[in-house]
Image (spheres, rainbow, N blue to C red):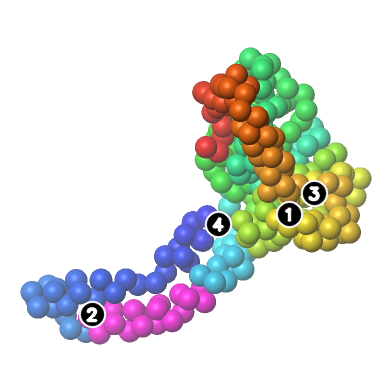
């Protein structure tokens, strides 16, 4: 994450030239420094365009180089290693964003915090993601959480995906970086050919491609939302005040106090 941030913020700001010019006028810096800053500004303005466009592949290359000289990523933390090697793993959530967050909440619905924690442990659900804040919240729920980039085969292997009975990707291709759901299907089939695969598509055509590739179920959020919305519209058109009020109240009750890992 630190490398991606550095790459995306690599371009020098033009406002710095204004500040440098004021510094030259005030005698705080030498004109040579201003000249160097102008050259740096021109170079970064050109190079940063391509650095940002290819930030993911550049980050991976830099990560490998840094690891060779002894700078380790969070993936090598002892806590992650123990989780990856000892705990059972039945359901793998590859990537963790809003849909996965809502799924965890639904699994906990109508249960006390203690019962919900026991359920999460009993179902042996584990998450692979590279958002450190997500890991803190997931572990507070008692869930197994492994830090890493799901686009890396070695990350998935380290996380123990080969032990999973069901592998799930709830993140659509337009959010995934460095991979897509078709690629994830191939990676899962390589690591754990016995696992059932659930992935996410943004169009029926893409969903059919995923089924052809070997997915067991393809989630299309827009179709599920449309089916639910159709029911809501039918209720609203019924002009039944009691039914409409019940629908609204039920939704408000469901939303009231709903706290998820990803808000």
In what element is the residue under mark 1?
loop
> Measured from the top left, where is residue 86 in percent x and y?
76, 33
**Number of marks in the rendered image:** 4
Q: CA distance from mark 1 to mark 3?
A: 6 Å
Q: CA distance from mark 1 to mark 4?
A: 37 Å
Q: Residue at x 60, y 19 (%)?
A: 242
Q: Earlier in the sequence, mark 4 or mark 3?
A: 4
Front tag of 1 and 2: 1
Q: Which residues are magenta?
A: 34-51
Q: Which residue is mark 4?
A: 71
Q: Which residue is mark 3?
A: 218
Q: CA distance from mark 4 to mark 3?
A: 39 Å
Q: Earlier in the sequence, mark 1 or mark 4?
A: 4
In what element is the residue under mark 3?
strand
In what element is the residue under mark 2?
helix
Q: CA distance from mark 2 to mark 3?
A: 57 Å
Q: Which residue is mark 1?
A: 201
> Measured from the top left, where is residue 78 in percent x and y?
63, 39
Q: Which residue is mark 2?
A: 33
In what element is the residue under mark 4?
loop
Q: Residue at x 42, y 65 (%)?
A: 9
Decide which of 74, 231 is in the foreground and name it: 231
Q: Quadrant of residue 107?
A: top right
Please check the rendered image and state whether residue 39 is part of the magenta-colored stretch, yes or no.
yes
Q: Which mark is residue 23?
A: none
Front tag of 2 and 3: 3
Q: CA distance from mark 1 to mark 2?
A: 52 Å
């Amino acid at each position: 994450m630190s490398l991606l941030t550095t790459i995306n913020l690599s371009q020098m700001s033009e406002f710095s030239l204004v500040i440098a010019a004021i510094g030259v006028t005030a005698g705080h810096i030498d004109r040579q420094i201003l000249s160097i800053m102008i050259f740096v500004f021109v170079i970064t303005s050109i190079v940063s365009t391509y650095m940002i466009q290819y930030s993911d592949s550049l980050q991976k290359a830099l990560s490998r180089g840094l690891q060779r000289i002894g700078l380790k990523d969070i993936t090598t933390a002892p806590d992650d290693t123990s989780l990856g090697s000892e705990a059972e793993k039945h359901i793998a959530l590859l990537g963790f964003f809003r849909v996965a967050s809502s799924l965890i909440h639904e699994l906990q619905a109508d249960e006390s915090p203690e019962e919900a924690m026991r359920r999460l442990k009993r179902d042996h659900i584990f998450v692979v993601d590279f958002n450190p804040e997500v890991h803190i919240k997931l572990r507070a729920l008692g869930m197994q959480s492994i830090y890493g980039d799901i686009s890396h085969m070695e990350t998935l292997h380290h996380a123990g995906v080969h032990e999973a009975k069901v592998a799930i990707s709830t993140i659509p291709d337009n959010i995934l970086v460095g991979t897509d759901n078709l690629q994830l299907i191939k990676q899962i089939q390589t690591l754990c050919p016995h696992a059932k695969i659930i992935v996410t598509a943004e169009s029926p055509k893409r969903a059919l491609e995923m089924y052809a590739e070997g997915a067991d179920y393809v989630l299309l959020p827009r179709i599920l939302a449309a089916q639910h919305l159709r029911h809501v519209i039918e209720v609203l058109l019924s002009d039944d005040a009691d039914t409409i009020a019940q629908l609204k109240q039920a939704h408000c009750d469901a939303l009231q106090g709903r706290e998820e890992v990803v808000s």
